[in-house]
Image (cartoon, helix red, strand yellow):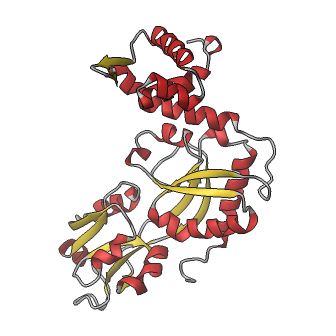
Amino acid sequence: MNLARLDLNLVVALRALLEERNVTRAGQRVGLSQPAMSAALARLRRHFDDDLLARVGGHYELTALGQVLLDRTSTAYDVLERLFSSQADFDPASENREFRLLASDYAVAVFGTELARVVHAEAPGIRLRFTQTPPTAVDDTATLLSATDGLLMPHGVISDFPATDLYDDRWVFVVARDHPGVEGGLTRRDLARLPWVTYQRTYDAPAVRQLGMLGIEPRVEISVDNFQLLPLMVAGTRRIALIQARLARMLAPIAAVRVVEPPYEAVPLREALWWHPVHTHDAAHIWLRETAARVGARLPRTDEE
């Protein structure tokens, strides 16, 4: 494939056509007349040797290839947009732009709120959009990172991408404040016999793998996709949950739970900001990463909270 022979404007047309599934609406969306958009569709059909849009009754439907291209085109468009918006210089006090960060609710609660306060004070024209990390983060990290400005995720889950460390945390357990039988702390036997509330995604994989290596098989009673729900599901029950210490201490007074140290030496947790190499030398992203690292370094240690 010779990219020099391709008209990259067709990416814009292709995305509009696949998402709108209507030539007229697609043209209006990108500022092209109906004849011009029809001509673009014809060129795309010749390139892919496929109709892409097939008329069914009074409307168009995507062909099998069109359906495949739908997500790929959106990703390609985002990559091109970010590529051509790269800057040699960046003045945070005067710039007006948005950064999109993928993060768990845990990372937003303990770090994102502090980052947002600093950005608000130092760069009033900068907007942050935090989006929940999708389940595909581990399976297709390159595609995910290419379409966003950064990913907040601890070490041990993904690798082979640039990252800057933000802060350290550790794993603890939460139990109901009046939980009977664990006044003196949890034992490994307790971990096997008591019901659990767990985070159902894979981003805490190192901590979960450690349990398996210790021969502990959690008896899962409740599974949620939000770390902040763990203490609420534990309160007033015999359940236990493994959670990050920073978040646990933040929510314990609200959820009527107490923090209990693990009956083993838990693997450490180091949160990092990951990015696609295409952003490495971009001035705006350098500022974002440096600001994030500065905010992370200012967070108190977990034994100081």
Q: Nearer the viewer, residue 27 or 160?
A: 27
Q: Position of residue 280 (x, y in %)?
A: 68, 43
Seen at 49% across and 15% down, the residue is 41
**Could one spot residue 15 in this view of the protein?**
no
Seen at 43% across and 27% down, the residue is 18
Q: Nearer the viewer, residue 32 or 122?
A: 32
Q: Position of residue 261 (x, y in %)?
A: 39, 80
Q: Position of residue 52 (x, y in %)?
A: 39, 18
Name which quarter of the figure residue 266 lies in. bottom left
Name which quarter of the figure residue 128 lies in. bottom right
Examine the rendered structure and indicate whether residue 67 appears above or below residue 151.
Answer: above
Seen at 57% across and 65% down, the residue is 112
Examine the rendered structure and indicate whether residue 75 appears above or below residue 209.
Answer: above
Q: Nearer the viewer, residue 91 or 204?
A: 91
**Quadrant housing the C terminus:** bottom right
Examine the rendered structure and indicate whether residue 86 appears above or below residue 198.
Answer: above
Name which quarter of the figure residue 218 lies in. bottom left
**With 191 as the anchor, is 288 left or right in this view?**
right
**With 66 as the anchor, is 3 left or right in this view?**
right
**With 219 as the anchor, is 26 left or right in this view?**
right
Q: Position of residue 39 (x, y in %)?
A: 53, 12
**Quadrant housing the N terminus:** top right
